[in-house]
Structure formats: structure tokens, C-alpha cells
Image (cartoon, helix red, strand yellow):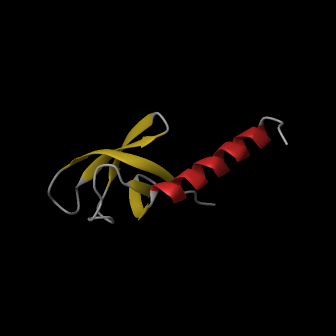
């Protein structure tokens, strides 16, 4: 099973379309991610990331929904509802 997770782009480096990268914040964990598949990405955008590569962009509202789902899953695994 594969999982793609959203994160907020906080910086972008590089001009080469294949090696352009961004630092993406996943709720406090910041990782360097390849942005080759989302050339339109800008600082402040939310990107869906899989295996170190941003595969698409989503709006802040949709990212918020996904963060809530992830939070619910975590609570269920801890013995919550």
C-alpha cells in the first residue's frame, strides 16, 4: 500500500526542472522534496508527497481535511473511538 501525505512548501531551491526542490513542512517535520512533477509550485502551496517527490498540489482547505483524517486515524490507533 502506498501513502501520499500533504505538506506546506516553505522554501524552494534550484532552477533546473528535474532537480528543483523544496523544503516541505509536515506538521513540524521538515523534509527536502523533489518538485519536478509540480513546476507551478510556489512557497505557501500545499503539495501531496510520495516517496520524496511532490506529485500534485492541493488547496489549503483540502490539506486541512486530510490532516484531520490523519489525526482521527492516530486517535483510533491509540485506543480512542
Let me know if residue 50 appears in the view: no
72 versus 28 height, above or below = below
Residue at 82% across, 38% down:
80
- The residue lying furthest to the front in this view is 61
20 versus 23 height, above or below = below
Q: Nearer the viewer, residue 40 or 55?
A: 40
In the shown orientation, is residue 14 left or right of residue 61?
A: left
Q: Nearer the viewer, residue 78 or 59?
A: 59
Q: Nearer the viewer, residue 57 or 17?
A: 57
In the shown orientation, is residue 65 left or right of residue 40?
A: right
Q: x, y percentage for residue 33?
A: 35, 49
Residue at 27% across, 51% down:
21
Q: Quadrant of the N terminus?
A: bottom right
Q: x, y percentage for residue 14?
A: 17, 51
Let me know if residue 64 appears in the view: yes
Residue at 72% across, 46% down:
73
Residue at 51% across, 56% down:
61
In the shown orientation, is residue 25 left or right of residue 81?
A: left
Q: x, y percentage for residue 16?
A: 16, 59
- The residue lying furthest to the left in this view is 15
Q: How many marks?
A: 0
Q: Quadrant of the C terminus?
A: top right
- Snapshot quadrant of residue 20: bottom left
Amino acid at each position: 500500500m502506498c501513502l501520499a501525505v500533504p505538506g506546506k512548501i516553505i522554501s524552494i531551491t534550484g532552477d533546473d526542472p528535474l532537480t528543483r526542490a523544496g523544503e516541505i513542512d509536515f506538521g513540524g517535520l521538515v523534509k527536502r522534496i523533489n518538485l519536478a512533477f509540480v513546476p507551478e509550485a510556489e512557497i505557501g502551496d500545499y503539495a501531496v508527497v510520495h516517496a520524496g517527490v511532490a506529485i500534485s498540489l492541493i488547496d489549503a482547505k483540502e490539506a486541512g481535511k486530510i490532516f484531520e483524517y490523519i489525526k482521527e486515524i492516530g486517535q483510533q490507533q491509540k485506543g480512542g473511538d
